[in-house]
Image (cartoon, helix red, strand yellow):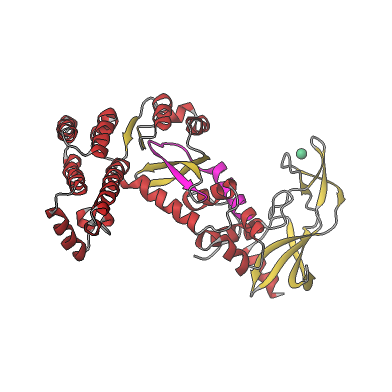
């Protein structure tokens, strides 16, 4: 009796009424089973055209899993009719609480998917006494609905990045919207080839692609090629984070080589543990590390030279006029090319060959903060880390859309709190 009252308050379906509530054994466990009946004289709805049609026959009762109550599983029990539509023929009627052959109600799937955003899929399955596969189907349902109903209008800024998955064995290409006020995952696809990103642009459509103003990316050549071809009106901006990463890779290369050399004379202690000190920005160092850094700076090590070259380059980002930034970059590259720090020379060459795209950051009036794409990618990494049990690329992609896609949820009549 009380349960019916609650259901009528929270989840009322037009043309259907709730009947008897009983405790029954379902798959070996006691569960609450709530009967559902069609309202008197209400005909079933044809699943194809949405019109009410006469009944062809009635099938056996089916159970539809609903929100658990006090830790007890709850099922709706209903015997679906088959409609005899003049236009579409005989089909199982449209049921407002479920979709297709799915045995979980939409409300339950939305409920599970919300939990699966907060805790891992595995934990969600455990807490709600269901299987991992059911949790996946619930999330997948919500994600597919969201992808179909999301709004892709007025997207002006996107960021393209790659993500290493499955212990770094494979790549996903990630495309984020990075407009102010709307930052989300737009698309992801396996691998990081030209054809991967081409697939995004094909799905995104030429009209929307033509409206893009800024595309932020790293230096990965296949991406650059596709962006140039497909986002014709956009300024391709090389992401500051990725540029500075090249500096760090160079410093580390120098340091490793130097440790090897120092080992031969038994002096490697100077540089051991120096790695993080050299790679961190000065502002992020701890007090002890600052003291260590001061000691290191007194030495005549090539690693320190490389470190100072990077620190010197940081001034580049303080310019406002592209022309001045250009001049600084050239001066820096000249100085570096006259040094004997080979990995840094490589960086200088790289900067020169990508100069136009790097200067686009200033042409965009420094309007793009560099951390956005990286921030989204870090969230994606967190999703993956939390995700023990994402067995395939498909599971992983659904999980990423789920947590980062900012997707609209299916409407259910049930209102959740919080
Ligand atoms: Zn029909």
Residue interval drawn in magenta: 138-166
192, above or below 41, in the image: above
Along the horizontal axis of the image, is 95 left or right of 378?
right
349, above or below 267, in the image: above
Residue at 62% across, 64% down:
125
Residue at 66% across, 58% down:
134
In x, y percent, where is residue 296?
Answer: 17, 56
Residue at 52% across, 63% down:
119
In x, y percent, where is residue 365?
Answer: 23, 36
2, above or below 213, in the image: below
Q: Which quadrant of the view contains residue 250?
A: top left
Of 418 and 299, the residue lying toward us: 299
Q: Which quadrant of the view contains residue 4?
A: bottom right
In x, y percent, where is residue 360?
Answer: 27, 32
Q: Which quadrant of the view contains residue 35?
A: bottom right
In x, y percent, where is residue 237?
Answer: 31, 34
Of 63 and 308, the residue lying toward us: 308
């Amino acid at each position: 009796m009380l349960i019916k009252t609650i259901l009528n308050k929270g989840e009322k379906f037009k043309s259907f009424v709730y009947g008897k509530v009983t405790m029954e054994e379902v798959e070996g466990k006691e569960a609450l089973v709530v009967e559902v009946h069609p309202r008197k004289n209400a005909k079933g709805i044809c699943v194809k055209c949405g019109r009410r049609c006469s009944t062809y026959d009635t099938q056996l009762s089916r159970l539809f899993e609903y929100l658990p109550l006090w830790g007890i599983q709850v099922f709706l029990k209903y015997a679906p009719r088959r409609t005899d539509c003049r236009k579409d023929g005989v089909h199982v009627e449209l049921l407002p609480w479920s979709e297709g052959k799915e045995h979980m109600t939409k409300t339950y799937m939305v409920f599970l998917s919300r939990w699966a955003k907060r805790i891992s899929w595995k934990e969600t399955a455990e807490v709600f006494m269901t299987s991992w596969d059911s949790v996946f189907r619930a999330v997948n349902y919500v994600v597919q609905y969201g992808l179909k109903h999301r709004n892709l209008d007025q997207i002006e800024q996107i960021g393209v990045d790659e993500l290493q998955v499955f212990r770094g064995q494979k790549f996903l290409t990630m495309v984020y919207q990075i407009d102010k006020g709307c930052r989300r995952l737009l698309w992801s696809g396996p691998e990081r080839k030209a054809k991967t990103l081409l697939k995004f642009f094909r799905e995104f459509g030429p009209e929307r692609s033509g409206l893009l103003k800024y595309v932020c990316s790293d230096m990965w050549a296949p991406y650059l090629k596709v962006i140039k071809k497909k986002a014709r009106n956009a300024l391709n901006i090389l992401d500051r984070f990725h540029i500075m990463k090249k500096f760090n890779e160079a410093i580390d290369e120098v340091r490793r080589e130097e440790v090897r050399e120092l080992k031969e004379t038994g002096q490697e202690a100077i540089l051991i543990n120096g790695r993080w000190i050299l790679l961190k920005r000065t502002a992020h160092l701890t007090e002890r590390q600052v003291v260590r850094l001061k000691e290191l700076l007194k030495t005549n090590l090539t690693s320190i030279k490389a470190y100072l070259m990077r620190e010197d380059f940081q001034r580049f980002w303080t310019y406002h006029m592209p022309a001045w930034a250009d001049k600084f970059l050239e001066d820096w590259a000249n100085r570096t090319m006259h040094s004997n720090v080979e990995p840094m020379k490589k960086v200088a060459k790289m900067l020169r060959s990508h100069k136009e795209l790097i200067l686009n950051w200033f042409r965009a009036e420094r309007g793009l903060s560099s951390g956005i794409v990286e921030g989204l990618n870090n969230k994606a990494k967190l999703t993956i880390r939390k995700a023990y049990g994402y067995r395939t690329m498909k599971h992983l992609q659904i999980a990423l859309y789920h947590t980062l896609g900012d997707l609209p949820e299916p409407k259910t009549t049930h209102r959740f709190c919080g």
